[in-house]
Image (cartoon, grey):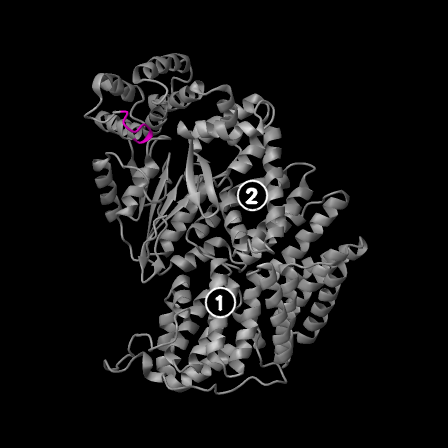
């Protein structure tokens, strides 16, 4: 992905161009003018005409202050998920009960950026509604939409894209053939005796880039003349269809159908079966989902490689490894054939089974050295996991699988910054009745995970209702595991609502239950960290340290990083309290780096809050105030700041009091405002800087050039210290 950076901060996610961009100079100029004068521009045209590539090229030439961000909407099948897709593309994390649109409005209100919405045609109403509201409330926003039809939003400027001009079409075919066939000689200077056939082929394909790309993929097997002969056959067959359709629409389908006709029976079969995947997929998934009934699993790789060579598939490198993707138009064509084979239901069940199995493996491996690999894998597979969830939660007699899948992904919803989406699936899951023991167990798990998500979102009433129902039903069915988890998360709820005695009682009981049933995983370790927080809040820091050192040892034995980060948070506070700011900073930096990698917004903002306290103790009150401002900007995406808890708020108040004393109220507020203007990545980057000379900050209003960030850089002791009795310590 294109990573535009300023001061080390990402400012965009446009895909890098991996091959040559051919022609389109007039269209690029027209699109640039439209973007200069309008805030909403839509590139329209038939499928395969090159809309996405043109939009990406034009967007890459823009340089708004906060970057260019592309949202791929082709994998989004449900209009309800359009807002979520935009939130995800922008890298936003919101643990609150806010709707994703509210998150977007808050994020974009004061930013200047270009948002590229690619593939709007199948979700046009949702895109139109979102675009109209965002443009109306974010004055620095421009939107470049891409689709087969306009959004019909007031102020929209439409740039229709026609097929390539003949000379550009020939050049595109020559370039792509040259990439696939080194030395084959299809450039303008080496067309030789095939020159006229190539030109005729491009004309017959109406200059549609997708059709030309498919043709280029066949030049290894057929000469341009042979391709023309076969194309003639396909034209005669398909022109007997809908004559009211635009010729280039018929031509595109003909081009895809012709490529399909040239495939072997095994290639056609795999093409059809691969259409069940949404977004990208890996080889192992393809082998499982698409094998059987005429296609042995050990032949899938060879057949897939053939489709890749013919440009039916594309290959991409991702943090989760090598993956494959099918263009939306090509997938739709394969989907029609899959339905015609009568095998669609079986293949969709295999797709669901694979992703239920993947979620099971990922949940187990979350408690292992592969935790980061699991996070990357689930990120890459999220479109397919959504498809499996949707299938399971809407098919009769399969509710238990949907409930199981929604619950098994708890680590992704909670640990990787997707609370809002997780809650949507969990609420849908627990509304369903599932029969049998498996169904009962799956629903109980979905209930406690829903309660956990609601706790972290600060939704006390719904959290308590879900957890009480879970415990009641678990006790009725003698499900010891569900009882332990319901009790644990009820203790977590007591912790964040300042009922420390009850929190300690419930958490100790839950940990005892876990030991009795032999349960040990990230959730169990988090229960011990939460117990440590309860002990710290009641004045017993030594016991909190003992508990968290034990968690740290277990995490290091098992390669666990997520729960370890929260243990480090408690240990860092204890180090600060004992007058060891250097060690506290080291622990917090480790904690923050891990949380940020996992997109764990709660872990990140808690670490930033405590780093501000350490920073003021180091003598840089101005930088501490900046970090407090940055944390204030992050909290709305998590929930109620510091949970509305007096215990969690104590370090914040200590830091603020010390910083105000050293800086004065006016200077403190200036620094906080500066921090509140920073983005999440900027705050994290700044918090991770090693202590040193004070970071330059805006001078106070009315001050001369000599006044600056170092104004409060004398060594500071906190104005007040947490006591060992009462509720003034923080975990």
Query: On screen, 126 above or below 498?
Result: above
Which residue occupies the foreground of this view, 510 or 652?
510
Residue 84: x and y in percent read 48, 49
Residue 4: x and y in percent read 32, 54
Query: On screen, 424 above or below 110?
Result: above
Q: Secondary structure at mark 1?
A: helix
Residue 465: x and y in percent read 68, 59
Residue 297 in the magenta stretch? The answer is: no
Residue 474: x and y in percent read 76, 55
- In the image, taking residue 14 as reference, residue 726 lies left or right, namely right
Q: Main secondary structure of the magenta part?
A: loop
Q: Which mark is residue 385?
A: 2
Which residue occupies the foreground of this view, 461 or 421?
421
Q: Secondary structure at mark 2?
A: helix
The image shows a total of numbered marks equal to 2
Q: Please name the residue that numbered disc 1 is placed on.
A: 590
Report the span colored magenta.
Answer: 179-184
One can see residue 163 in this view: no
Q: Which mark is residue 326?
A: none
């Amino acid at each position: 992905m294109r990573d535009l950076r300023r001061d080390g901060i990402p400012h965009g996610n446009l895909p890098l161009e991996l091959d040559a961009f051919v022609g389109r100079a007039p269209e690029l100029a027209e699109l640039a003018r439209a973007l200069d004068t309008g805030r909403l521009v839509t590139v329209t045209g038939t499928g395969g005409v090159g809309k996405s590539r043109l939009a990406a090229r034009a967007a890459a030439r823009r340089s708004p202050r906060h970057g260019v961000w592309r949202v791929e909407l082709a994998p989004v099948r449900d209009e309800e998920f359009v807002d979520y897709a935009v939130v995800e593309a922008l890298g936003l994390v919101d643990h609150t009960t806010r709707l994703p649109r509210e998150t977007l409005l808050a994020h974009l209100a004061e930013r200047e950026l270009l948002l590229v919405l690619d593939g709007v045609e199948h979700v046009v109403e949702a895109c139109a509604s979102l675009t109209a509201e965002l443009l109306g409330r974010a004055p620095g926003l421009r939107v470049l939409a891409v689709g087969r039809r306009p959004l019909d939003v007031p102020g929209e400027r439409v740039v229709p894209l026609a097929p390539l001009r003949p000379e550009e079409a020939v050049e595109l075919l020559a370039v792509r053939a040259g990439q696939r066939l080194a030395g084959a000689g299809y450039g303008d200077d080496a067309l030789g005796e095939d020159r006229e056939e190539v030109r005729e082929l491009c004309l017959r394909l109406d200059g549609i880039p997708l059709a030309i790309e498919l043709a280029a993929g066949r030049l290894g097997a057929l000469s341009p003349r042979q391709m023309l002969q076969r194309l003639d056959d396909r034209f005669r067959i398909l022109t007997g269809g809908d004559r009211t359709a635009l010729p280039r629409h018929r031509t595109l389908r003909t081009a895809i159908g012709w490529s399909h006709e040239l495939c072997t029976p095994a290639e056609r079969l795999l093409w059809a079966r691969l259409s069940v995947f949404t977004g990208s997929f890996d080889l192992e998934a393809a082998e499982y989902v698409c094998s059987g009934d005429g296609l042995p699993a050990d032949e899938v790789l060879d057949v897939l490689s053939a489709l890749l060579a013919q440009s039916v598939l594309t290959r991409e490198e991702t943090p989760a490894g090598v993956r494959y993707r099918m263009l939306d138009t090509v997938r739709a064509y394969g989907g029609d054939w899959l339905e015609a084979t009568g095998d669609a239901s079986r293949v969709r069940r295999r797709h669901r089974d694979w992703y239920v199995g993947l979620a099971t493996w990922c949940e187990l491996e979350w408690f292992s050295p592969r935790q980061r690999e699991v996070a990357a894998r689930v990120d890459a597979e999220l479109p397919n996991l959504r498809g499996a969830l949707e299938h399971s939660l809407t098919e009769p007699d399969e509710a238990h699988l949907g409930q199981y899948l929604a619950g098994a992904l708890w680590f992704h919803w909670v640990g990787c910054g997707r609370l809002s989406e997780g809650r949507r699936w969990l609420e849908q899951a627990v509304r369903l009745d599932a029969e049998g023991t498996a169904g009962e167990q799956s629903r109980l798990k979905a209930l406690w995970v829903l309660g956990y998500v609601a706790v972290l979102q600060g939704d006390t009433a719904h959290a308590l209702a879900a957890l009480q129902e879970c415990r009641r039903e678990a006790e009725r069915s003698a499900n010891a595991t569900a009882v332990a988890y319901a009790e644990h998360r009820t203790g977590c709820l007591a912790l964040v609502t300042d009922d420390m005695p009850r929190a300690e009682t419930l958490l100790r009981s839950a940990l005892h239950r876990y030991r009795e049933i032999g349960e040990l995983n990230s959730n169990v370790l988090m229960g011990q960290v939460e117990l440590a927080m309860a002990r710290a809040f009641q004045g017993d820091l030594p016991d909190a340290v003992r508990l968290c050192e034990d968690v740290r040892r277990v995490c290091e034995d098992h390669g666990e990083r997520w729960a370890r980060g929260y243990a480090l948070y408690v240990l860092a506070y204890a180090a600060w309290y004992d007058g060891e700011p250097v060690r506290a900073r080291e622990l917090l930096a480790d904690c923050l780096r891990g949380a940020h990698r996992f997109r764990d917004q709660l872990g990140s903002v808690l670490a930033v809050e405590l780093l501000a306290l350490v920073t003021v103790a180091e003598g840089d009150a101005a930088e501490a105030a900046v970090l407090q401002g940055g944390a204030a900007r992050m909290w709305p995406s998590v929930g109620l700041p510091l949970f509305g808890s007096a215990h969690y708020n104590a370090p914040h108040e200590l830091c603020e009091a010390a910083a105000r004393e050293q800086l004065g109220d006016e200077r403190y507020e200036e620094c906080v405002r500066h921090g509140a203007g920073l983005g999440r990545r900027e705050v994290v980057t700044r918090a991770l800087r090693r202590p040193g000379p004070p970071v330059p900050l805006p001078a106070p209003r009315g001050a001369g050039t000599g006044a600056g960030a170092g104004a409060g850089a004398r060594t500071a002791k906190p104005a007040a210290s947490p006591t060992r009795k009462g509720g003034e310590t923080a975990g």
